Amino acid sequence: TEQKEIVNPETGARKVKKLSPKETKKRKADFIRLCNLETEIYIKKGKYTSADSAIGKSGEWIENQFKKRDFAVRDYYTLKGKRLHQKGELKEATIAYENAAKYTKFNVNEKTGTEVNENLIYLYTSRKKKHESIKKQVKIERAVKQSFGKNSFQYARYRVIDVNKNLLEYKYDKADKRLASIYKIKFNLPETDNFRAQLIDLKSLIDVKNGKFSATEDSLKKLIKIKKQLYGDKSPEYHKEVLKLANFYSSYTENIRLAKDMQDVSFFQHVAPQLSPQDPKYTQYLQQIAYTYEQLEKYDQAIKYLEDAAGYIKAYYGKENAAYAKDIEKLANVLLKKGDYLKAEELIKEAVKIFNNLSNVSPSE
């Protein structure tokens, strides 16, 4: 509404007065900020379905009611970009972050502005946009060094960008050395801080690629402990870390039955209820669970989860994409082990045809 109620402190009489244009703009910005805060809470708690609903509500309000340059709008596009990135929609995430960047001048002292630019660098790199990535990164590096120096938390955050770029390029030894240099920076953060958790997560990714399985397990257990302290052992964020450890056990150790038990509880009871099947992570979890059953030689269960994943991908994105082709390739491998050679052959031919049609086109583009 564009009205406000005024109460006379002496008589208690009430009257309604029309808001001024300035007051109207402020009230609309306040509403968007509340929606943004609601969205941020949902994302941090892993309640992704609720987060997407809140983002949709904010977007509709901005489109129909606001259309003003305001930091609240910038924050809306930042959160939208974050969710799109989580769902693997890289092109749309880039557009959202670019819209956010229009609403703010880059300032290394401003948290959200820095986050926007850091995510744009990562997305440009993921989408093979080298020129845009380098241009944005040089700008950030220069600003961070001038304002904080190289021995600062801000500079450590900047160095993480390089580690992620090395991982995208499969340069694991180089990523390991860069991560080690970050650990040498003395920044005053709690042991349970999310940035420290991010570094431990990166370490686990690098170690598993370099065959350091004991170190990987240690890192994953540390992450579980941190997420439990931050969010509690009933939260989806905590159980996503449990699933990382379960997937590690299934893929690299003999603790396969333990992995199955962990997946049964963490995914089906805590993570799945908060994820839409449209989210790529949902089908990725199904594929990981299918792999565990495959390792246990329970092929019918593995086939069921892979068929479910293929069905969701086809329903939301169609059959002509790499995600669908990769899923039916996994399904074909299980069918071969079960002895269903004819169906396996059909699926392999279908997957090859899809990949040939896609040629060099990235599914994220």
Image (cartoon, rainbow, N blue to C red):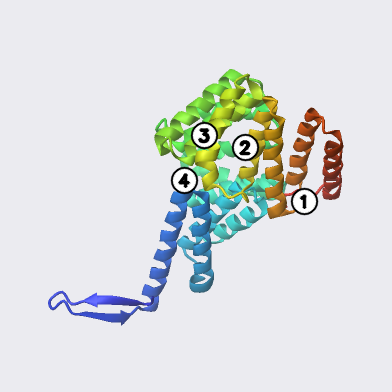
Judge by depth and name the residue closer to the eye, 288 or 83. 288
SS state under label 4: helix
In the image, is residue 93 above or below residue 258? below
Q: Callout 3: helix, strand or loop?
A: helix
Residue visible at 55% across and 34% down in the picture: 264
The three-letter code of the residue at mark 4 reads Lys
Write the residue at 78% across / 33% down. 335
CA–CA distance in space, label 1 to label 2: 30 Å
Query: The N terminus appears in which quarter of the rendering?
Result: bottom left
Q: Nearer the viewer, mark 4 or mark 2?
A: 4
The tag earlier along the polypeptide, 4 or 2, is 4
| Total numbered badges shown on the rendered structure | 4
Q: Secondary structure at mark 2?
A: helix
- Cα–Cα gap, marks 1 and 4: 32 Å
Residue 80 screen position, x and y as percent:
55, 55
**Residue at screen point 57% across, 36% down:** 160
Numbered mark located on residue 319 in the image: 1
